[in-house]
C-alpha cells in the first residue's frame, strides 16, 4: 500500500509542473512537428499538408548547408578557445599571489553581464569610425587605417567569436578553479618530491580532477554555442553577406522575417535533431568518463 | 605549491595583470563611454578619459518625462522587472512541490531527466506555435504572455536546482517528525521548507537573472512599450540610428547593474552552483 500511494502522491505534487510543461513545451513541440509538414504561413493561412517537401527543400538548400558550416565553426572555435583560456586562467588563479581574491571576484563580471549588453559593448568596440579597437590599434601603430571589423565577411565571425569567448571563458575558469582546489596538496607535493615536472604533474596529478567538471562545462557550452542567436543578432544580424548567419538566425528569418511557418518549423526541427545528437553523444562520453575514473 | 623562485613569481604577477586587463578593459570602457561627451567619443585620436565627466545621459535615461527617450527606457526597465519577477515566482511555485516529490520518491526520479532534457531544446523549436498560441489568446506584446513563455526556461531550471537542494536535507529529519505524529503538510511547512529557504532564494535569483537576460522570445513576442523588455530596448538602440554611442553605453551600464551586483554578492553560491553544473552560461 505505502509504495503505490507514495508514487501517486509524487505525481500529484508534480501535477502543476507537468501541466505547465505540457502547455508551454510539449504542445508547442508537437505543433512544430505538425507545422513542419505543412505550407502554413505565420499569420493567416493554416496551410495544407505537403509531406516532407519542407525538409527536402531546407536540407538541400545552400542556405542550410552554409549556416550549418558557420554554426559548427562558431561552436568549435569559441568553445575550444574558452576551454583553453579557462583552464589557463584557473591554473593562474590557483597560484598564491596578492590580489588573488579580487581577481577571482572580477571573473564574475563577464558572466553576469547580460548577453545583449555584451554584444552591444563589443559592437561599440568594433565600430568602424569611432570604435576603441580601431583607435587602440592605430595609436599603438599596429593598424594603418580604420577597419570595419563587423562589416567585412573575412573578420565578422572571428570578431563575434572573440566577444563570445570574452563573456564565457571566465565561467570555464571558475568551474576549473573549483576542481583544482579539490586536488589534495600532499599528492601534488609528493609528485614534486618524486621529481615530476610541471607538465607531468598537470597530466597525471591535476588532470584527473579536472576532467569531469571540464567535460560537463564542454557539454553545456557546446550546446549553448550551437544554439547561438542573441550575440549574433545584436552584432551583425547574420551579415555581412550572410557570413555570420547561424542555424538559429536562419530559422528566425525563415519563420518570422519571411513568415513561412511551415518551412521554418522543419528547419527548427532539423536544428533540434542536431542538438539532440550532440547531447546524446556527449552523454555517452560522460558516462564513459564516469566509468573510467 | 610551486617553487618560489623570483622569475616564476614575476611571471605569475604578469599573467595576473594581463588577466585583470582583459576582464576589466571592455567593462571599464563601457563605463567611460557612458560618462564621456559625444565630442570625446568621436575625437581622433580617441580620448580615453573624458575631459569633463558627463552624467547627463543617466539623467536622460532615468527621466520619466512623457515621450522622451527616458520614458521608453524606464518603461522597458519596468517591463523586464515585471516579466522576470512574475516568471520567477510562477516557476518557483510549480518547482517546489515537484522538486520535493522527485527528491523523496525514487520511483519517479526518472521524470527529472525528462524535465532537464527539455532544457536542451533550442527555443526556435517552440517559437512558431508559441507565437500562434499567444496571438490566439491575445497575449502577444503582453508582459503576462512573455512571463508565461519564460516558464519554458525557468520551470525546468528551478526544478533541477531545488531538487538538488532538497537532496541535501536529510530525509531522516522528515521521518523522525512523521514518527512523532506530524502530518505531511506540517512537516513541509515547519521543517523542510524553512531548511530549504537558502536554496530557494538562490534558485529564485538565478531564475530572475536568466529571465532578465532573455532576448530571443522577447524580440519575437513584444513590439512596443507595453511589453518590450530591456534587452530588446538595448538591441534597438544598438541597431538603430542613435548617433550618441554614449547613450547606448549608458543603457548597457544600467541594464548590467542588477545582475552584476547580484553576481558579486552571490559569488559563493554561484561558484558552488557552477561546479554542480547547474548554471547556464
Image (cartoon, rainbow, N blue to C red):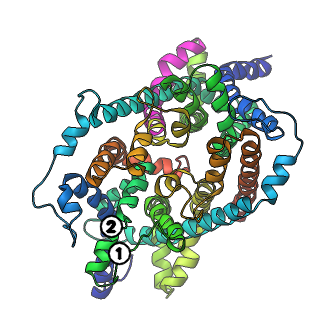
The residue positioned 34% from the left and 46% from the top of the image is: B256
Q: Are marks 2 and 1 in contact (CB under 8 Å)?
A: yes
Q: Is residue B43 above or below residue B178?
A: below
Q: Magenta stretch?
A: B182-207
Q: Quadrant of the N terminus of chain B?
A: bottom left
Residue B16 x %, y %: 32, 72
- From this viewpoint, is residue A153 visible? yes
Camera-side residue: A274 or A256?
A: A256
Please rate how many residues cluster around mark 2, counting C-alpha atoms within 10 Å: few if below 14, some from 14 to 19, many from 20: some
Quarter holding residue A61: bottom right
Residue B125 x %, y %: 69, 42
Q: Is residue B10 above or below residue A284?
A: below
Counting every numbered tag in the picture gives: 2
Residue B197 x %, y %: 44, 29
Camera-side residue: A28 or A10?
A: A28
Q: Magenta: predominant secondary structure element?
A: helix
Give the mark nearest the N terminus, 2 or 1. Answer: 2
Relative side of B96 to B10, left or right: right
Q: Residue furthest right?
A: A51
- Determine which residue is flagged by label 2: A129
Relative side of A54 to A144, left or right: right
Residue A146 is tagged as: 1
The residue positioned 35% from the left and 34% from the top of the image is: B77
The residue positioned 29% from the left and 76% from the top of the image is: B13
Give me the chain letter of mark 2: A
Q: How far apart are the alpha carbons under marks 2 and 1?
A: 7 Å
Are labels 2 and 1 assigned to the same chain? yes
Camera-side residue: B100 or A22?
A: A22
Quarter holding residue B194: top left
B206 in magenta:
yes
Amino acid at each position: 500500500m505505502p509504495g503505490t500511494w507514495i508514487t501517486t502522491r509524487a505525481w500529484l505534487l508534480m501535477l502543476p509542473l507537468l501541466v505547465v510543461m505540457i502547455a508551454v513545451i510539449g504542445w508547442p513541440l508537437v505543433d512544430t512537428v505538425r507545422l513542419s509538414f505543412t505550407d502554413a504561413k505565420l499569420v493567416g493561412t493554416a496551410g495544407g499538408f505537403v509531406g516532407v517537401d519542407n525538409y527536402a527543400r531546407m536540407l538541400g538548400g545552400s542556405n542550410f548547408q552554409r549556416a550549418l558550416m558557420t554554426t559548427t565553426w562558431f561552436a568549435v572555435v569559441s568553445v575550444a578557445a574558452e576551454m583553453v583560456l579557462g583552464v589557463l586562467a584557473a591554473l593562474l588563479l590557483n597560484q598564491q599571489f596578492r590580489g588573488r581574491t579580487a581577481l577571482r571576484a572580477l571573473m564574475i563580471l563577464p558572466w553576469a553581464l547580460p548577453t545583449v549588453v555584451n554584444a552591444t559593448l563589443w559592437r561599440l568596440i568594433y565600430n568602424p569610425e569611432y570604435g576603441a579597437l580601431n583607435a587602440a590599434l592605430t595609436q599603438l601603430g599596429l593598424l594603418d587605417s580604420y577597419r570595419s571589423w563587423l562589416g567585412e565577411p573575412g573578420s565578422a565571425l572571428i570578431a563575434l567569436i572573440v566577444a563570445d569567448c570574452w563573456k564565457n571563458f571566465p565561467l570555464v575558469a571558475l568551474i576549473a578553479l573549483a576542481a583544482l582546489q579539490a586536488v589534495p596538496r600532499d599528492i601534488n607535493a609528493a609528485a614534486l618530491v618524486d621529481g615530476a615536472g610541471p607538465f607531468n604533474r598537470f597530466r597525471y596529478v591535476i588532470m584527473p580532477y579536472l576532467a569531469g567538471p571540464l567535460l560537463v562545462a564542454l557539454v553545456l557550452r557546446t550546446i549553448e554555442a550551437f544554439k547561438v542567436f542573441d550575440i549574433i543578432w545584436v552584432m551583425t544580424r547574420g551579415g555581412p553577406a550572410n557570413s555570420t548567419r547561424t542555424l538559429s538566425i536562419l530559422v528566425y528569418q525563415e519563420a518570422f522575417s519571411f513568415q513561412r511557418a511551415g518551412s521554418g518549423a522543419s528547419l527548427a526541427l532539423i536544428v533540434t535533431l542536431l542538438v539532440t545528437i550532440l547531447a546524446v553523444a556527449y552523454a555517452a562520453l560522460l558516462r564513459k568518463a564516469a566509468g573510467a575514473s | 605549491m610551486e617553487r618560489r623562485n623570483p622569475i616564476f613569481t614575476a611571471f605569475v604577477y604578469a599573467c595576473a595583470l594581463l588577466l585583470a586587463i582583459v576582464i576589466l578593459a571592455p567593462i571599464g570602457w563601457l563605463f567611460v563611454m557612458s560618462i564621456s561627451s559625444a565630442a570625446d567619443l568621436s575625437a581622433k585620436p580617441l580620448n580615453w578619459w573624458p575631459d569633463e565627466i558627463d552624467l547627463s545621459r543617466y539623467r536622460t535615461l532615468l527621466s520619466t518625462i512623457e515621450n522622451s527617450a527616458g520614458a521608453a527606457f524606464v518603461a522597458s526597465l519596468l517591463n523586464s522587472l515585471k516579466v522576470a519577477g512574475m516568471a520567477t515566482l510562477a516557476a518557483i511555485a510549480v518547482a517546489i512541490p515537484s522538486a520535493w516529490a522527485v527528491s523523496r520518491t525514487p520511483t519517479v526520479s526518472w521524470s527529472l531527466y525528462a524535465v532537464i532534457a527539455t532544457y536542451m531544446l533550442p527555443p526556435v523549436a517552440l517559437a512558431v506555435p508559441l507565437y500562434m498560441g499567444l496571438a490566439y489568446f491575445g497575449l502577444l506584446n503582453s508582459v503576462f504572455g512573455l512571463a508565461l513563455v519564460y516558464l519554458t526556461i525557468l520551470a525546468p531550471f528551478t526544478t533541477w536546482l531545488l531538487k538538488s537542494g532538497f537532496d541535501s536535507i536529510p530525509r531522516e529529519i522528515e521521518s523522525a517528525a512523521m514518527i512523532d505524529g506530524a502530518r505531511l503538510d506540517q512537516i513541509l511547512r515547519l521543517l523542510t521548507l524553512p531548511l530549504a529557504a537558502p536554496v530557494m532564494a538562490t534558485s529564485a535569483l538565478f531564475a530572475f537573472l536568466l529571465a532578465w537576460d532573455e532576448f530571443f522570445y522577447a524580440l519575437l513576442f513584444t513590439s512596443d512599450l507595453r511589453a518590450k523588455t530591456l534587452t530588446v530596448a538595448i538591441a534597438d538602440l544598438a541597431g538603430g540610428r542613435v548617433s550618441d554611442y554614449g547613450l547606448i553605453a549608458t543603457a548597457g551600464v544600467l541594464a548590467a547593474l542588477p545582475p552584476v551586483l547580484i553576481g558579486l554578492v552571490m559569488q559563493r553560491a554561484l561558484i558552488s552552483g557552477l561546479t554542480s553544473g547547474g548554471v547556464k552560461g
